[in-house]
Image: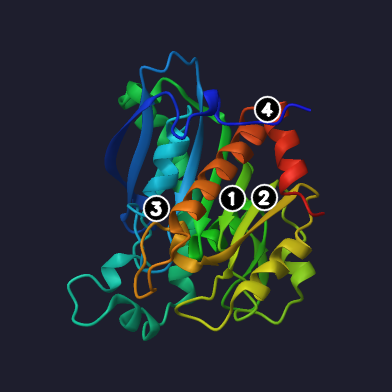
């Protein structure tokens, strides 16, 4: 069997990648602003390109995980990175002390978490008009082929959009599934056992799309008390059969964001970043471009269910 490889065996794709920045304002939510950053290829000769959303971790922003976005975009995708106000870098920017120390002391109201979750359908609703106003890349954005990914808190946001039941303040479990999202990648999947006593099969079982779970043996949260083992519980209980798992030996929490924070330098960082990029592209090619070779490569290398 011929295994999938990136186009022409290149480390980076064949297309030059440009950036665009902007903000969407939601009048239905008190003029809540959602800043975004778009990575898109040019001079590609393609008729259309899938669209992938990315959601940052706690204290992050639209600028995280650029190494993944540039790589995937260079292979013919449009990536839209969101900033979720209230759980973003504005919590610590300009304040004395290290960001992680500040974030550890920050309590996130459930309403703010739900506001972050609601940013996802709002951005998806807003993108078609932005695409019309920005024909490069808008003319090529295929809104029938949408994926979503996120890191840590952003992985939880992705899980919610994928169909995970989320606990509201009154204790009820509700679905915030967005049917437009066809597949997702979870960089450091984040369990929600600290938010509810519901069993994991009840929470994660309703997920109805293919997911790629990525973590590492040193993937302990710098802000909470869960790590590698707890992240695997999500993979075990997701209902949709197409679930993949990559575990990086020595991989830590921040490798997916492209920054280190207080973590010491990791001698495997470059190796891990290459593994993450290539595996991410294979998953998107399999599920957003219907590439049979990519799907076969995914099932042979990363499927454990």
User: Which numbered dot is residue 211?
Assistant: 2
Q: Which of the marked residues, 2 or 4, is nearer the chain's N terminus?
A: 2
Say which element carries label 2: strand
Q: Which of the marked residues, 1 or 4, is nearer the chain's N terminus?
A: 1
Q: Toward which corner of the image does residue 218 lie, by quadrant? A: bottom right
Mark 3 or 1: the one toward you: 1
Kindly report the distance in space between the C-alpha atoms of the residues bearing marks 1 and 4: 16 Å
Q: Nearer the viewer, residue 271 or 107?
A: 271
Q: Nearer the viewer, residue 212 or 106?
A: 212
Kindly report the distance in space between the C-alpha atoms of the residues bearing marks 3 and 1: 29 Å
Say which element carries label 1: strand
Kindly report the distance in space between the C-alpha atoms of the residues bearing marks 2 and 4: 15 Å
User: Which numbered dot is residue 185?
Assistant: 1
Q: Are marks 1 and 4 in contact (CB under 8 Å)?
A: no
Q: Which of the marked residues, 3 or 4, is nearer the chain's N terminus?
A: 3
Q: Are marks 2 and 1 in contact (CB under 8 Å)?
A: yes
User: Which numbered dot is residue 290?
Assistant: 4
């Amino acid at each position: 069997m011929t295994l999938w490889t990136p186009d022409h065996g290149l480390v980076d794709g064949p297309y030059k990648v440009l950036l665009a920045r902007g903000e969407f304002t939601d009048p239905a939510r008190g003029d809540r602003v959602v800043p975004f950053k778009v990575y898109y290829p040019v001079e590609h000769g393609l008729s259309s390109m899938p669209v992938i959303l990315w959601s940052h971790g706690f204290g992050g922003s639209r600028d995280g995980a650029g190494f993944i976005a540039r790589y995937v975009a260079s292979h013919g995708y449009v990536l839209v990175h969101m900033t979720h106000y209230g759980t973003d870098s504005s919590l610590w920017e300009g304040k004395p002390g290290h960001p992680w120390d500040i974030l550890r002391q920050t309590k996130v109201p459930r309403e703010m978490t739900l506001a972050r979750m609601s940013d996802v359908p709002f951005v998806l609703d807003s993108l078609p008009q932005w695409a019309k106003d920005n024909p490069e890349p808008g003319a090529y954005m295929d809104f029938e082929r949408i994926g979503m990914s996120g890191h840590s808190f952003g992985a939880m946001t992705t899980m919610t959009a994928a169909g995970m039941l989320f606990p509201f303040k009154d204790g009820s479990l509700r679905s915030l599934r967005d049917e437009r999202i066809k597949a997702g990648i979870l960089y450091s999947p984040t369990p929600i056992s600290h938010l509810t006593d519901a069993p994991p099969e009840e929470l994660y079982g309703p997920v109805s799309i293919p997911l790629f779970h990525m973590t590492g043996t040193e993937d302990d949260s710098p802000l909470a008390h869960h790590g590698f083992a707890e992240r695997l519980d999500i993979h075990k209980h997701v209902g949709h059969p197409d679930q993949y798992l990559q575990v990086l030996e020595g991989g830590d929490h921040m490798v997916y964001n492209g920054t280190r924070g207080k973590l010491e330098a990791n001698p495997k960082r470059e190796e891990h970043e290459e593994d993450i990029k290539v595996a991410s592209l294979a998953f998107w090619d399999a599920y957003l471009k219907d590439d049979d070779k990519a799907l076969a490569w995914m099932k042979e290398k990363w499927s454990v269910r």
